Image: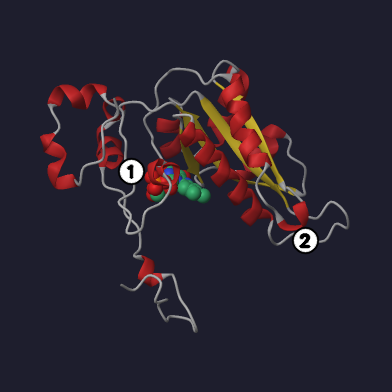
Amino acid sequence: MLRTYLPSPFIHLIADSDKRKIPMHKPAPTDFPVHDLIRDRWSPRAFASKSVEPAVLGSLFEAARWAPSSSNEQPWAYLVATKDDAESFAKTLSVLVDFNAGWAKQAPVLVVAVSKLKFHANGNPNRNAFYDTGAATALLSVEATARGLGVHQMAGFDPAKAKEVFDIPADWEPIAALAIGYPGVPESLPHGLRDREVAPRTRKPLTEFVMSGHWGHTSPIVSR
Ligand SMILES: Cc1cc2nc3c(=O)[nH]c(=O)nc-3n(C[C@H](O)[C@H](O)[C@H](O)COP(=O)(O)O)c2cc1C
């Protein structure tokens, strides 16, 4: 059983015994209905120690593979480290900022997402490389949700150090790190992070970023 999301005033209603045992489930409180996989994806910091089967990880990267990209360039690469590959795992952990390393070390899988900055065919700059890598990683995250996994993306890492420790070529840029694993219990986290783990998920209102006609004019699609 997964602990369902409760708005913060009601968090105290969860029985103490449950608090110790049940991984968080934080479905998005949406204004319009969305697919369950979109609603249920979120970024956990607590992970169970259970390893992720290689075939399941394969499906995650297969999902990334089928993302759309500008000119079908597919300008992404992923450096994957599972915990049983102690050397790669330690290398990946070493490039994270301390805050992220503190919780991400519990995840059974760490990944660095890397973008190719120039088009393969002509060497011209690819201004969509980060966009496309983000799209691929978004699909990976949705596939992970479908398989009961959590993915937590991180900008808090040292790209220069990542380039050095993984020997990444000059025309590729590390853009994000990912922690992947089955959900753990918030109680496995230090106190400050525990509160953030159970905090409600928030978003800007749709009326702030869906526009029609001219900049700043809220689209009637979302103003109701
Ligand atoms: C590109 C990117 C970078 C992020 N960097 C960090 C990070 O360094 N550390 C962290 O704890 N969370 C990080 N996050 C997680 C976000 O804080 C999180 O996605 C956001 O608060 C929304 O929460 P949700 O994913 O649970 O809906 C990052 C997310 C993305 C997409």
Residue 32, percent across and down?
35, 58
Q: Is residue 17 above or below residue 138?
A: above
Extreme residue in the right direction = 122
Instruction: Specify the quadrant of the image occupied by residue 17.
Output: top left
Q: Is residue 179 left or right of residue 17?
A: right
- Label 1 residue SS: loop
Q: Is mark 2 within 8 Å of ligand 1?
A: no
Give the quadrant of the C terminus.
Answer: bottom left
Q: Of the residues shown, which amino acid type is indicated by label 1?
A: Pro
Q: Quadrant of the N terminus?
A: top left
* Left or right of 200, for residue 93: right
Within 10 Å of disc 2 (Cα), the crowding (few <14, some 14-19, many 20+) is: few
Spot occupied by residue 40 in the image (x, y as percentages of width and height): 39, 41
Residue designated by label 1: 27
Q: State how far apart marks 1 and 2 are (Cα).
A: 38 Å
Residue at the top extreme, as displayed: 84
Residue type indicated by callout 2:
Pro
Indicate if the residue with disc 1 has its beta carbon within 8 Å of ligand 1. Answer: no
Which mark is drawn over residue 125? 2
| Element at label 2 | loop
Mark 1 vs mark 2: which is more N-terminal?
Answer: 1
Location of residue 140 by image quarter: top right
**Outermost residue, bottom direction?**
214
- Position above or below: 71 against 177: below
